Each structure stands twice: as C-alpha cells, then as structure tokens.
Amino acid sequence: MATRVLNATSLARDLGRWRTDADGAPGRRRTSRPTYRALADGVRLLIHDGRIPLGAGLPSERDLSAALDLSRTTITSSYAVLREEGYLISKQGARSTVALPDMARPNGLLVQTRDAAGPVIDLSHAAMAAPTESMMSAYTSALQALPSYLSTHGMEPIGLAVLREAIARRFVERGLPTTPDQIMVTSGAQQAVRLLLGTLTSPGDRILIDHPTYPNALEAIRRVGARPVPVPIGPDDSGWDLEAIAGAARQTASKVAYMIPDFHNPTGRCLHAEGRAELARIARDTSMTLIVDETMVDLWLDAPPPPPVASFGRVSGTDIVTIGSASKSYWGGLRIGWIRANPSLISRLAGSRAAHDLGTSVMDQLAAGFLLEDADSILGARRRQLRERRAVLEAALAEHLPDWSYRRSTGGMSLWLELPTPVSSALAATAPSFGAVLAAGPRFGVEGAFERFLRLPYTREPAELAAAVAATAAAYRALAPNAATREPVLVF
C-alpha cells in the first residue's frame, strides 16, 4: 500500500506560529531554542494532537524547505531530531513515516519519553474515569433488559423510546417542557454536531462561534466547508459580548451559531439568565439557528446553571437546538448524545443520519437510561470529586506557576490559564519531555489565536495533577527562564 504523504503547504499552515520563540525569529525575544529544534517541536505537537496521522509520510525536505522558506539543512536537522526521538521511522528504500515513540501506550494516557524520569501524564483531555460501580450496575441492568429488544431489528435512527423519554424528563425537571418526539439519540455529542451542521449548512456558510471554543466543533465546521465567525469570550462577569454577537450575526448573515453557555469549554464560564434571553432574541431577530451545547450542564460546581437557553425561545423552545451528552457527565466511553429540536428537524436529521449509521448501540442506550434514573446521586458524587480536584490544581498552580492567571471555573472540568508569554504551542510541544501532555491554546481558536493561553483539566487523580503541574512548570522554565514570578492572580 502506498504511503500517504503530507502536503508541504498544508503542513506549513498547520504548524502556525512555530517560529515565535525560535532563536533568530525576527522581532521576537531570542531563546536558546534553535530553529530546527523549534520546527521539530512543532511537528511533534501536531503528532500528539492527532493532526498528523500515524503512518503518514512527511513532505520531502525540498518541498518543506520551500513552503517554510528555510534551508534544507534546517529541515534535515529537524527530521533527524524527530527520527532520534522515535517520531519518524525510517526503512531503507522507503519514505520515513510518522510514529509515536516505542514506549508510547496506545490509549495516550501514559507516554514514556526518552528524557522523562517517569510516566507522562495526559492533561490534553478533559474527561474523568467512569464511576465504576454505577456503570457496572447500569450495564448489568441493560443486559437484563436486552432480551425484549432482540426480536426487533435493533436499528432506531432517532433512538430507543425509553431513553428519549428519560432525556425528555430531564429537560422537564430543568423547567423546559419537552416531549420524546423532540429528542434524537446520537452516538455522542460530536455526531450530533456533525449531523446538525450537515443538515443546516452548506459549504461557504458562516457559523458564529464563541471564541475560544470546543476544538472538535471547529473541526466539524471545517469539514462541512463552513467558515467560523469567532466572537471573543470577554473578561467581564458575563463572558459573552452579546452586543458583539448581535453585530456579527447581522454583518455576516450567519445561518447558524454554535455556543456553549453552560460551563463553557475551555473557560468554564456560565452565561446568566438575562444573557440567555438576549441570545435567544438575537437568534430570532437575525433568523439564525442557535445550536446550544449543553454537554457540561450537569457539572456545576459552585451553583446550578440558569434555565436552559431553549426555555427563552418560542414554540416550546424548539426554535433553539440543544445538544447534550452522557459522555462528560458519566464516562467518555459511553458514546451517548442527544439533540432536542423541533420534531420536523428531528425527522430531517434521521433522514441524513443514514449516510453515517443506522442508530446508536442498543446496550449503550439502555445503560444510559438506567444512569439517568440515578442521575442525581451519581452526579452529586462527580461534582464533589471535581471540586476537590479543582482545589488541588489551584494549589499546585499557586506553588509552581504563581505568575499564571485565571478566572476560577464555576463548573465543567478545566481551568483556562493565561501565560505571561505567548509560548503555549511551544510549551505543549516541549512538555512531554518533562512529564506532561498538554492541549495548547491555539487548539481552541481560529487561525492561531490563544498562544498566551492553556487549558488544564482537573479530571485526573490529585497526585497526578500535582505532578503534571510540576512538570509543566519545569517545561515552562526551560522555554521562559527569565519569566518573573509574583503572587498568583486569581480572578473571581
């Protein structure tokens, strides 16, 4: 089978501002990192992010040299570093292909690098381990309920009635009247986003987003050929600049908006009730379909969120589309998501879904239904655990990185940290050698934004969080050895 070779121009684009902190970059502070090393770190970051697929071939030295306007000697040296560290595998007579170091574990949770003294802790994912006892109980109950479905074909494009009823009840409990025919079950929230974008948009359409935002939603927007229109999350209490959202909606004629008002990923912000009403009004006035991502809504830590945004809509809130998920609240391996929308849109989505799959796993749907029956008990324990780990992460940051600032998340799973220097991508590329895998700020933005930011989740065990922050601090000191230290900046 022929090796897929990456396009040099595409790789240059994906690398973004990799030269920002390389030695000799014009107009920038010089550091000890030479250009070839900075390029190797940039490529390594793309590999860890999954943006360079394993087994692919890197562009030829000549092509990449031309695309980046560098000497071939620099490209040769960068490739040599990647080869030495195990990120390129060379075979005689064949092109070098992308790999992970031999000691990398396939699940990405623990990666051993040459330079690290111990296991590398993955902080690139905001996800918790499963509540084992509850999960086992739910699947045991699902297995007992399964026989009554075995006489059917088992394919339900909009989901099992029993689960749609349970999801609808959860909306009703939150003050939003909902019927099962307004619910479609999907294989995770990510499939819900893809289905909605594929049904509601066409290539070239503009989609309004809060900025930063969920990286996989950005990727879904790109894959349908649409154009994201970012509106920044502001520093004030509300976070969302509603006036800017209204202006952007009018000026760009965006057909769709994708927003995360409930414990926003990655900032952890929560939009107040007045802002939700205004957001719904903006969508009505501009004839824009508002997609509200509620995947974090159950993970409030300081206070429950206001009523759902859809409760401020018209026609029982079905003019506003809502996405939910069991994956963040319960377990990432439980690929259950849902869409709440007008029944007519649900029918359209079911027709579109046939091109992707014919329905979600019956066992997973049954298990999710049993988890929802015991939701309050399970989620209460999850929130307590997250509060404790948030405190651990904050204490570790105060000890090791006191010059980093952040606003405490009121819910969700992560802190959005502002760095004193714009080295987020370089830090994420360097950190594995010190013991941590990080998600760089630009992953959450458009066109290389957020080099001064980093998302750190508080979902790992306390000891792992403390060790990962210490490793991150060591990597940061290697990149910014002269960074000033001062009292930690915590914004309430």
Image (cartoon, rainbow, N blue to C red):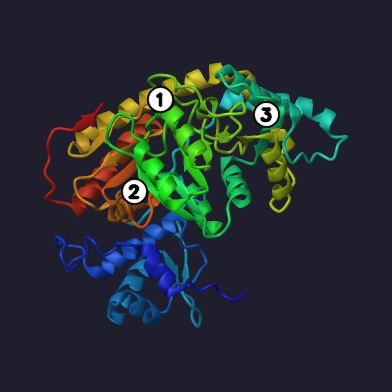
* Of labels 2 and 1, the one closer to you: 1
Residue at x 32% of width, y 71% of height: 78
Residue 54 drawn above or below residue 130: below
Q: Position of residue 216 (x, y in %)?
A: 49, 48
Ranked by sequence position, the earlier of labels 2 and 3 is: 3
The residue that label 3 is drawn on is 367
Q: Check contact, mark 1 vs mark 3: CB within 8 A.
A: no
Count every numbered label the image shows and give the total.
3
Amino acid type of the residue that numbered disc 2 sits on in the rendered structure: Gly
Which residue is nearer to you in this view: 461 or 192?
Answer: 192
Residue 459 drawn above or below residue 428: above
Residue 424 drawn above or below residue 461: below
* Of labels 1 and 3, the one closer to you: 1
The residue that label 2 is drawn on is 441
Ranked by sequence position, the earlier of labels 2 and 1 is: 1
The residue that label 1 is drawn on is 274
Amino acid type of the residue that numbered disc 1 sits on in the rendered structure: Glu
The disc label shown at residue 444, or none = none
Q: Is label 3 in a helix, a strand or a loop?
A: helix
